Image (cartoon, rainbow, N blue to C red):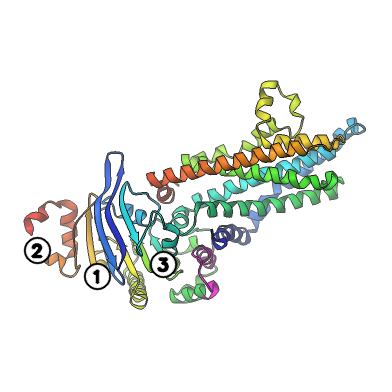
Amino acid sequence: MAVIEVKNLVKKYDKFVAVDNISFEIQEGEIVGLLGPNGAGKTTTINMILGVLEPTSGQINIFGKDLKYHKTEILEQANFAAVYAHLPANLKVEHNLKVFGHLYGVKDLNNRVKELLKEFDLEKFKNHKTGSLSSGELSRVNLAKALINKPKLVLLDEPTASLDPSVSKHIRDKIKNYVNTTKSSVLWTSHNMKEIEEVCDRVMFLVHGKIILQGNPKTLAKEYGKKDLEELFITVAREPLSLNNEI
Amino acid sequence: MKFSRIYAIFLRQLYLVKSNPIRLLSLFMWQIIEIFQWGFITKYLGHFGGAVFSFTTFILGAIILWQFMGRIQTGIMVSFLEDIWTSNFINFFASPLKVKEYLLGLILTSLAISVTGIIIMVLVAGLIFGYSFFIIGLYILPFLLVLFIFGVAMGIFITAIVFKLGPMAEWLGWPIPALMSIFVGVFYPVSMLPSYLQVVSWMLPPTYVFDSIRMILSGNFNVGANLLYGFILAIIYLFITYLFFLGVYKKNLKTGAISRFSSEAV
């Protein structure tokens, strides 16, 4: 059974179409990359899946349930981290994790927080104000929050944006390890094509709100006559119509 | 509805206060200043008319009750603004949290602040000016209840306005208690107002509370009907403002304002 099933999803703001009739599925244990240039509709799609933006039309089923009618039940088993969603900067790291632990109804919360602090190498920062951390430390805190309820679905909107390669790798390894051990599913947006190639089982390219191509990130570029995923991305972003000629 | 989610909203504010004692001081400083200010004013006025009217009893009692209501309203508003200032909306509303749980968390926070505030004010008023808050007996409880419900309604109304118009609208929330005090007879009977303003007064639940206090202090304990009107009105306001907040939330879900509050608006 698909963990996420998106059918004919549309989001319009007056005449502007941000997401244009997209449909896709994500299976259990699958990491799917949602790629596209700025303004393509990636964050809009993620916000609709998170239930903070109402679609104009279409349907989102998660864990076999319609998000429109089962939002709370669904979100108890999902979580997210996004580059633009900051945890309260004036709370200590440990306090932030505890607040979100209560919010997600985590059992044995104190132990879960200790576990995450250790796993993400945050023990020495637990009494630091979240806003005082570096961007790498902050990304680890965001990810710890995203995994606090051991979610079956994780949505990651540019989780490694502006991080150095070492921290990015650390984050990628943590997520891959989490998926391998829990068989959870991940929807991941990024502008780092090497990262996507390394982590994702499948990618979808979104341009002007439409999914224009999808496939295996390791073979997709070759299928379209491109050197690598980055070159494919540039073509998709600049001249998506030209792809039809190259198939 | 789950208590753990309501508690999470409360806990977030509690941690803020615990980690910053200056914040704690700022929560109660103004109330203590008000008690001192009005305590000395009423003491001075007592020299002139103390034989016929106990200024201390009425004015300090009114100040404490009015502050209680104002604190409920601003407590809800400030806790809500805290989520705007820290760009935290998307984290809360993309979680299993329901709107009513969020509001109940804000109410619980403001109730804790207001109750602590009222205890401090009563203690200061009692120790410095010999004022007894319980001079009107158990009537104080329904008075507090009506003011609490109306304070919550006003708090929800202001947060809904900020939610609708954006963070810049927060200034609308601060003068509301002062503005309302003109109409509800905190410091003088409503009969002092022109008749066209009295119409507004009797539409506001606190008017019934302060009118009842005056009745009791003048020996008339027949305030049941008065309090019932105040209570029913407060419930109606609460219901309407909750629906208003819900309407704004649903509209923001359509426009994308919830995620924009986090990423762009602040």
Q: Which mark is residue A201?
A: 1
| Label 2 – label 3 distance at C-alpha | 36 Å
Q: Residue furthest right?
A: B51
Q: Are marks 2 and 1 on the same chain?
A: yes
Q: Which residue is mark 2?
A: A225
- Between the C-alphas of marks 2 and 1, the distance is 20 Å
Q: Reading the chain from its start, which is encountered first: label 2 or label 3?
A: 3
Secondary structure at badge 3 equals helix
Residue B162, given in percent of the width and then of the height, sits at 51, 42
The answer to whether B114 appears left or right of A174 in the picture is right
- Which of the marked residues, 2 or 1, is nearer the chain's N terminus? 1
Query: Residue at 33% across / 59% down in the picture?
Result: A61
Q: Amino acid at mark 2?
A: Gly
Q: What is the CA distance from the residue labelled 1 to the residue labelled 3?
A: 20 Å
Q: Main secondary structure of the magenta part?
A: helix
Q: Is residue B242 above or below residue B7?
A: above
Co-location on one chain, circles 1 and 3: yes
Q: Is residue A64 above or below residue B169?
A: below
User: Marks 2 and 3: CB-CB under 8 Å?
Assistant: no
The kind of residue on which mark 1 rests is Asp
Q: Does the magenta-highlighted stretch encompass residue B9?
A: no
Image quadrant for the N terminus of chain A? Answer: bottom left
* Residue density around tag 2, few if under 14, some if 14–19, many if 20 or more, within 10 Å: few
